[in-house]
Amino acid sequence: MSPRFIRPTIPLRSRRYDVGVKCDFCSDVPVATHYEVPGFRVDLDDPGVIAYSEGPWAACAECAALIDKGDRRGLAERAARRLGPLYGIPKGPALQQVRRFHDHFWERKMP
Ligand SMILES: [Zn+2]
């Protein structure tokens, strides 16, 4: 059985994200807005994990401000700073994973 993850920022085997409840970038609440993004799949180093995104991405006010400024680096660093400790992932790998998803987001984000 392949695990599935909805709109992951950091994919975890046992966790599903609450759609639209938390920020899809940093897991903060409340959600301030959504960004339309066509679905995509992300290939990870671990072949046992399938990560994909479907539907709009929710964003808290702080992440939305970074997105609206086009601040890719700031958004990735904020997400990694918050999600890394949350899931026990060191800063370097967390930033790497976050960027992998964010790159798809930035490429596909609707204006
Ligand atoms: Zn956020």
Image: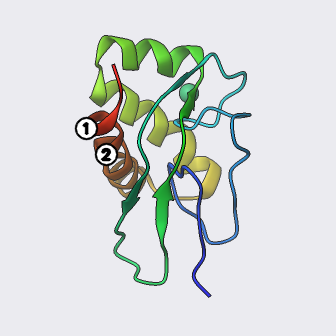
Q: Secondary structure at mark 2?
A: helix
The quadrant in which residue 46 appears is: bottom left
Report which residue position mark 2 lands on. 104
- 47 to 80, vertically: above or below: below
56 or 73, nearer to the observer? 56
Q: Quadrant of the N terminus?
A: bottom right
Residue 82 - label? none
Mark pair 1, 2: CA separation: 5 Å
Name the residue located 59 percent from the left edge and 58 percent from the top edge.
88
Q: Secondary structure at mark 1?
A: helix
**Rendering coords of residue 5 (x, y %):** 59, 62
The residue type indicated by label 1 comes to Glu
Q: Residue at x 49, y 22 (%)?
A: 63
| Residue picked out by circle 1 | 107
Q: Position of residue 70 (x, y in %)?
A: 28, 18
Q: Is mark 1 within 8 Å of ligand 1?
A: no
Residue 22 position within the rendered picture, expressed as x and y whole percent measured from the top left: 69, 34
- Give whichever of 79, 108 is nearer the camera: 108
